[in-house]
Image: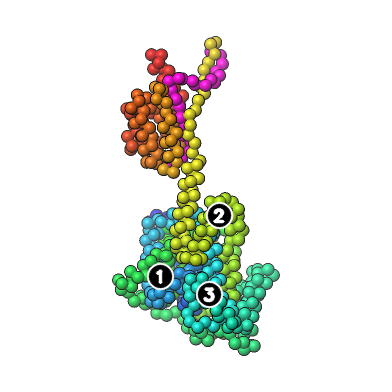
Amino acid sequence: MPDSLVPKTVSVFKEGYDGARLKADAFSGLTVAIVALPLSMAIAIASGVTPDRGLYTAIVGGFLVSLLGGSRVQIGGPAGAFIVLVAATGARHGLDGLLLATAMSGVMLVAAGYLRLGNYIKFIPYPVTVGFTAGIAVIIFASQLRDLFGLTLSGREPGPIIEKLATLGLAAGTVNWAAVLTAALTIGIILALRKLRPHWPGMLIAVAAASAFVALLQLPTETIGTRFGGIPRGLPSPAFPPFSLEKAGAVFPDAVSFALLGAIESLLSAVVADGMTGRRHRSSMELIAQGIANFCSALFGGICVTGTIARTATNVRAGGTSPASGMLHSVFLLLFMLLAAPLASYIPLAALAGVLAVVAWNMIEKPAFMALLRSSYGDAVVLLATFVIVVFRELTEGIVIGFALGAVLFIDRMAKSISVGETKPLVALKKENGEEEHPVVADDPDTVIYRISGIFFFGSAATVGTVLDRIADQRRNFILDCSEVPFMDSTAANVIEGTLRKAERTGVRFIVTGARSQVRRTLRQHDVRPPRVVMRASVQAALKSIRDEKSA
């Protein structure tokens, strides 16, 4: 098996694993579990499912991501990026459809890993990832407005943001000021601890304080207990969601969206971890692990699993050294669930909404967003298009259109970077006494030389073709210098073949110089080869052969 398909756990234990590393991993795992406990429940509730399903996801999925993954420090679990997709899928197809789509996405991710498709995620332009993340943050914040203000709705809360805001606006008269106070208290504690005690588990402390505040004052605000009846003490028995070909076909587009978003999110998180640790993850193995984790999460009633940037960064900062920290984080979460499940009933939903409001604010890469707006017109267009489509249309559509715009922008920039034109190279000649060389311009009235500089591909083919059409028919020799062409595609080769045909009709000898092996191979495939053309190593070599021929 190639190294790219070997879990990092195997590599770590081959290196040697001792008690000191176990102690460091246990501490970091506990730290991450404390952060993940309220966050997993909050994400599950925002996704339209019960809070226990967020814990199932973090326990089962998080354990498998660490055990089988291609990163030493990746932490898996439910992620805010999936809230909109999970909620929409659950609303359309019910819980069974959601679980089936999650399991199917797991199979797709495993296949993507074995096909080495993880290597292509890196081609997603930076403005797309920034705009995508900012768009998700806006959607997450909008999804928490109901619980932040304790609003009472007459019907179901719409998914699309315009309809959502309109419905919430109509319910503005039902604001619960106890919920507003609880959410404000939660956010205030998180922000204060982040500034004063950055190493403390601010989210857990804030949720605990808000829960005590509501319970002691008996404030009239919804809690996990009043809406969901609490959470169970333990994991359910594994069971595959009800399956039929009709149901699988109905949820297939959602499964594709889950797989695409999961691949992007997990590999971006792994890249962030690489930057923090100086290590390098195995993208193919990471996708396989994410796929197995999603499949098994669905078996236990969990939702989508992915690598999470915030929890992974927390793991690194807390001293995690190996996948054992991620596995222990899941074990600690299971212990919390077994021992403290009754206490979860007292957690106010407004407090969890406050946690997600902070998460949403942190997700927006504000300096990067502003820098891209100022950097260039093209980057700004890609950024804003992705952001607007994600917020007002759909996540996957935002990624696809953003990527397409980024690709068009890249093609345009590369097409403009190529240059082509007539050139007068210098040749070295000796004085009559033979003692000194000096350069002179090679000026042969029977020869014209054109040089192409840059990547010659379909985007620049029309520009180059227009210039090459100016070949002077009265010249006997046409030299095309390709020494500064690192790559040529079939469209470009076809342009040169068209120029060659014109030269053949007018009796002009066509000489190609300096072509690299890839360029020569592409030209040969389009019949630009001897004897139709003369191939020379350099312009100087071509000129020498012409002079030798004349003097013969």
Lower sequence index among marks 2 and 1: 1
Q: Position of residue 318 (x, y in %)?
A: 59, 66
For the point 64% across and 84% down, the residue is: 213
Q: SS at mark 1? A: helix
Q: Position of residue 323 (x, y in %)?
A: 50, 65
Q: Which residue is labeled 2 in the image?
A: 380
Residue extending farthest right: 196
Q: Which residue is labeled 1 in the image?
A: 102
The answer to which of 129 and 266 lies nearer the viewer is: 129
Q: Quadrant of the C terminus?
A: top left
Magenta residue check for 439: yes
Lower sequence index among marks 3 and 2: 3
The answer to which of 465 and 138 lies nearer the viewer is: 465
Up-down relation of residue 304 to residue 496 (above or below): below
Res. 227 in view:
yes
Check if mark 3's residue and mark 2's residue have beta carbons within 8 Å: no
Residues rendered magenta in the picture: 434-457
Residue extending farthest top: 433
Disc 1 crowd rating (10 Å Cα; few below 14, some 14-19, many 20+) is: many
Up-down relation of residue 105 to residue 183 (above or below): above
Check if mark 3's residue and mark 1's residue have beta carbons within 8 Å: no
